[in-house]
Image (cartoon, grey):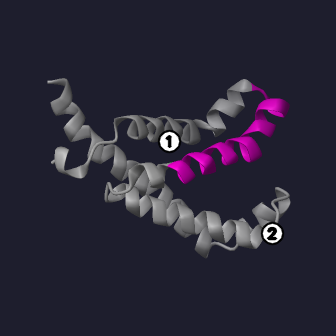
Amino acid sequence: MKSTVHMHVFPWMCYVIAFVFITSGMIKLVISDFKITFTQLGMPFPEVTLFLIAIIEVACGILVAGRIYLKIAITPLILIILGALYVTKLPILLHKGLLLFLFEARLDIVMFILLLIIWSKNKPVDNLN
């Protein structure tokens, strides 16, 4: 029973992760406000960094949606999540407290946990259908 549930939930976890990263990457590419945000965060070469992160999010999101090369696709997404937590959420924890940090970081934390679950439960696509 347990493996049957896993077989039905695993693709949906991949779709949810893919949805978040693909939409996030696409928005970074089309909304110019992100360039200002990356500049204010003190990112090196903010426009190039923004472009690379956006392309990685979209490309890896597509791979996750297709459930192909999962370990290769998940690795940069985990690094992006950790970077986002460090650069944008850690200052909230340090200056505004734990409760506001947890609120602001809730999506990052959930995505991080889902990425780790998929990383640990990665199986070939043939075994999931």
Question: Amino acid under label 1?
Answer: Met
Q: Residue 48: where, in percent of width, then height?
A: 72, 72
Question: Amino acid under label 2?
Answer: Phe
Q: Toward which corner of the image does residue 104 lie, by quadrant?
A: top right
Report the disc number at residue 111.
1
Q: Is residue 84 left or right of residue 43?
A: left
Please say whether residue 61 is one of the residues in the magenta stretch.
no
Real-space CA distance between mark 1 and mark 2, rounded to the nearest whole angstrom: 26 Å
Please report contact status of discs 1 and 2: CB closer than 8 Å, yes or no.
no
Majority SS type along the magenta span: helix
Q: Residue 114: where, in percent of width, then height?
A: 44, 38
Residue at the spot x=56%, y=36% of the render? Answer: 109
Report the disc number at residue 66.
none
Q: Is residue 64 above or below residue 9?
A: below
Q: Nearer the viewer, mark 1 or mark 2?
A: 2
Residue at the spot x=18%, y=44% of the render? Answer: 127
Q: Residues within 10 Å of mark 1 (few under 14, many from 20)?
A: many
Residue at the spot x=24%, y=33% of the render? Answer: 6
Going from N to C along the chain, the mark reached first, 1 or 2, is 2
- Dot 2 falls on a residue whose secondary structure is loop
Q: Is residue 103 above or below residue 87?
A: above
Q: Nearer the viewer, residue 27 or 75?
A: 75
- Dot 1 falls on a residue whose secondary structure is helix
Q: Is residue 71 left or right of residue 107?
A: left
Query: Which residue is denoted by mark 2 in the rendering?
Result: 45
Q: Is residue 110 left or right of residue 104?
A: left
Q: Toward which corner of the image does residue 62 lie, by quadrant?
A: bottom left
Residue at the spot x=53%, y=69% of the render? Answer: 26
Residue range in magenta is 75-97
